[in-house]
Image (tube, helix red, strand yellow):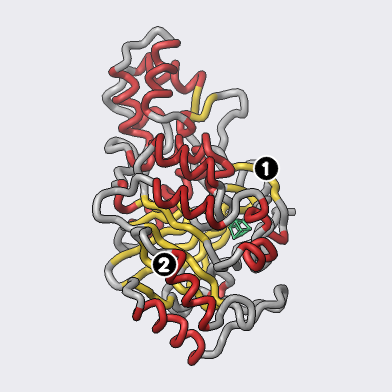
Amino acid sequence: MNSINKEKIDLKNFTRDDLTDFVRDHGLSPYRAKQIFSWLYRPGITDFSQMTDLGKKLRKSLDDQAFFSSLTTRVREQSKDGTIKYGFLLDDGNMIESVLIPDGERNTLCVSSQVGCAMGCLFCLTATMGFIRNLTPAEIVNQVCAVRDDLLQRRLGTINNLVFMGMGEPLANFANLLSALKILMDQLGLNFSERRTTVSTCGLVPGIKELGEKIKVNLALSLHAVNDDIRGQLMPVNKTWNIAALLDACRQYPLPRRKRIMIEYILLRDINDSEKDAKQLAELMRGIRCKINLLPCNETPDLPYRQPSAEKIACFQQILLDSGYTVIVRSSRGSDISAACGQLSVSKEP
Ligand code: SF4
């Protein structure tokens, strides 16, 4: 991240309300906050001198006390299927990754919320790195700004959807996630609608409830198993909040209009891919407005899991289709550049 001065305040950590408090505290009229905020997220704006509707004196005073950050892109790799992985260097030398997944005319950006992750899901490479730290609101939002600018520059369109499915458990970084969402969804910020923004969780039940109370966004749930025994082995979080508690929170979650909860289910050979599992999944989802994504596991030499056969995947999907669900088998995107689901990992620049 380009920090001009560590003593200065990064205005990109502020929601519009936070910025209003900041300008008030500095003896300025609240409408200044709206003016400044509306500049912060425009492409190509890098310093206060470009904010031409602010007086010179104000720009100088802002420059003395504050700055606004951006991310340094260290890696940009494109998969043969069009997926693009971005590696961003943070101030402290840590790297985070975001993944752009083009689908026809639409681009979905998978955003990271933490450096590493503490959740310890057994099938996930990020988990092997452990938890390093939470990302700030600015570091979350700047991933979106950097990718948007790259797409603009290369005339590759724009970002249509945001999914918080990158590195980290978003709800474990709740306060910063919430500020970032407010900035991303502010009309003067990045202007993403609630329908185009999805937060994914491995199952932090209090976080799901709080998210529903504080902001309206789509929810994705990494379920991955249909009984507490298997889920507890694959995902330690299940020992704190079991499947029943989780599905209860999902039932109560206030979704945006005409939206459904995305249920993510990684298919792991001989672990959770049987006909019985599929039938149990159909049973569990009864009464939940949902769409089921089946993700045949991305094999990696570092983890012991294997993908089920194509027949087994088709059979699993068919059972759910026959039960009346919308079910999509998600083909693995970007696996040749280690950008696929569960393959993101962190490294530190020497
Ligand atoms: S799957 Fe998500 S929540 Fe689980 S360890 Fe990986 S990044 Fe963390």
Q: Which mark is residue 17?
A: none
Q: Does the beta carbon of the residue at mark 2 sit less than 8 Å from ligand 1?
A: no
Q: Quadrant of the C terminus?
A: bottom right
In the displayed structure, would residue 88 be above or below residue 52?
below
In the rendered view, does 229 fall on the left or right side of 186? right
Callout 1 amino acid: Asp
Say which residue appears at 43% left-offset and 78% top-offset: 81
Query: Could you say which disc has been placed on residue 101 in the image?
Result: 2
Three-letter amino acid code of the residue under disc 2: Ile
Which labelled disc corresponds to residue 92?
A: 1
Q: Nearer the viewer, mark 2 or mark 1?
A: 2
Residue at (33, 38) in percent of width and height: 189
Looking at the image, in which quadrant does ligand 1 appear? bottom right
Front in this rendered view, residue 311 or 104: 311
Disc 2 vs disc 1: Cβ atoms closer than 8 Å? no
Of 73 and 141, nearer the camera is 141
Quadrant into which the N terminus falls: top right
Give me the C-alpha separation between circle 2 and circle 1. Answer: 28 Å
The kind of secondary structure element at disc 2 is strand
Residue in front for this viewpoint, 181 or 188: 181
